[in-house]
Amino acid sequence: MIEFRSVTKTYPDGTDAVADFSLVVPAHTTTVLVGSSGSGKTTLLRMINRMVEPTSGSIEIDGEPIAQRDPVRLRRSIGYVLQNGGLLPHHRVIDNVATVLRLEGTPKQEAREKAAEVLDVVGLDRSLAQRYPSQLSGGQQQRVGVARALAADPNILLMDEPFGAVDPIVRAELQAETLRLQQELHKTVVFVTHDIDEAFLLGDQVVILSTGAQVAQVGSPSEIIENPADDFVASFIGTERGARALRTKHTDHGTVLVDGAGRTQGRLVESSS
Amino acid sequence: MDLFAEAIAWIFSTDTQSGSLPLSEAIATHLAFTVVSVLIAAVIAVPAGWLVGHTGRGREIAVGLSGAARAVPSFGLVLLLVLVFGVTHKVGASTTAFVLLAIPPILAGAYSGVEAVERRIVDGARAVGMTSSQVLGKVEIPLGLPLLIGGLRSATLQVVATVTLAGYVGSWGLGFYIVQGIQIRDFAQILGAALVIVVLAVLLDLLFALAERAVVPRGVRAGRDGR
């Protein structure tokens, strides 16, 4: 469990990236922080592994304030997937994945064996192990990034817009893969995105943020769609438009659902109960 | 007669090989001055440059120093240091001058190499739990190596040309032939010695060009050359 207690981050120029933010991230579930740019979501994420230090307030992991922990050790105990992979270009895939294990003093051979296993877990062919990151596609690089984050078997996984830079088809693939992984591994995942559809797809708990990391609404995807807290949330998640504002239309072949523009989005399937 | 032919004849004549200062000895001294000066400069400037690049502190000083040093007249510096150190310490004085000339390009190569590493790569390295010195040693230094070698390259070329001036203060190096040649009006000897210096410089440059290529990390080169 990760707990933010009245966390504030003020930059030297006086702007508040985060103002009085409190949140409980339950263990073994996925919490998605979603907001447009400037909402402070990445700042919040980076506070969890002390890449950013809060100006005031505290963050606790399993009841223990992280401010008392050594930042380097803390980071090694938390998996972190960066937006653009952030892989080391001069290290082979296998050694990139083994990075944290090697930092923690695991012997080279053992670390590589473990890393090869993790490549299997994230669905990367072992034949790619000897390549360099620049020789991989964007989607493959992201998988390597996920593998690196998982290699030391951390309890917590931080993902900072990990699929923002790949094309929609690969993104869908990686999202499905993330869901599958989470069903197997049950990590405490904190995921940052600006894509509300991605947030609803992956999140058990979704946190919608407005400017300055003000919490607009926290809840499960269903709760938020069924009952948006205010106009900001409603417009952010788009309940008035697109595939989230559907009405029924009766046709000769049954009832279908159409959006505001009259395009058919799906069929209404009556439940048997 | 063609001066070039005379100059080349001078280079290969037996007198030149076995005179009061044999050519091989002059080349060896010339190279020794160059290598020792660049090495001393590297020992000082490389760690300093890495620290500047890594911490971002002292960057203005480093930039200013590298810029200002280009304007220092090398001949004046050599003579000044000989006067300051005293004529009994000509070797030390000349070497110090060459070291001072070699420091700025090496410093610039070291700090710009570290600085040029993409921020997201450094950020990623920190985020997975590398200590500050691990980031420097495992990420910034290896990735910054090509620019550092570039700095050593220009330092070496500058010094190999400037060591010629040592011939004015002592009877060493290829510069001696030039100084002596001017005094006895032997233009073949002047040109011959100058040609040898040019060949030395070209060879050293070639060596560094190869080294610069060799130190590009494999993964980086793989990406640059395409799949």
Image (spheres, coloured by chain):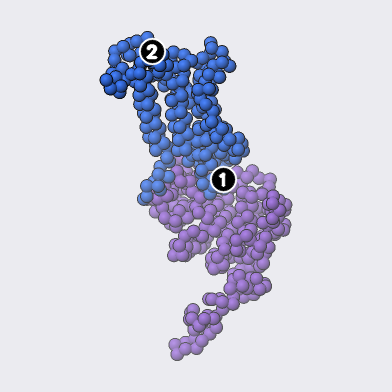
In percent of width and height, residue A230 lies at 67, 73
Residue at mark 2 to residue at mark 1: CA–CA distance:
65 Å
Q: Nearer the viewer, residue A26 or B218?
A: B218
Residue furthest out toward the bottom = A252
Q: Please give the name of the residue rendered at 50% of the width and 39% of the height, measured from the top-left corner.
A: B113
Give whichever of A176, A13 is nearer the camera: A13
Q: Colour of chain B?
A: blue
Q: Chain of mark 2?
A: B
- Contact (CB < 8 A) between labels 2 and 1? no
Mark 1 element type: helix
Type of amino acid at the residue the image marks with label 2:
Ile
Identify the residue position indicated by label 2 in the image: B184
Mark 1 chain: B
Q: Which mark is on residue B126?
A: 1
- Image location of residue B24, percent across then percent down: 35, 16
Q: Is residue A168 left or right of residue B194?
A: right
Few, some or many residues within 10 Å of mark 1 (<14, 14–19, 20+): some
Q: For the N terminus of chain B, which image quadrant?
A: top left
* Disc 1 residue type (three-letter): Arg
Q: Is residue B2 shown left or right of residue A42? A: left
Frontmost of labels 2 and 1 is 2
Check disc 2 and report its element: helix, strand or loop.
Answer: helix
Would you place residue B11 above or below residue A173 in this image? Answer: above
Which residue is rendered at x = 50% and y = 19% of the image? Answer: B94
Category of crowding for the residue at label 2, using alpha-carbon neighbours closer than 10 angstroms: few (below 14), some (14–19), many (at least 20) = few
Of the two numbered discs 2 and 1 on the same chain, state the one appearing first in sequence: 1
**Chain A hue?**
purple
Q: Position of residue A146 (x, y in %)?
A: 50, 54
At 46% from the left edge and 16% from the top edge, which residue is drawn?
Answer: B168
Res A168 seen here: yes
Q: Is residue B156 above or below residue A87?
A: above
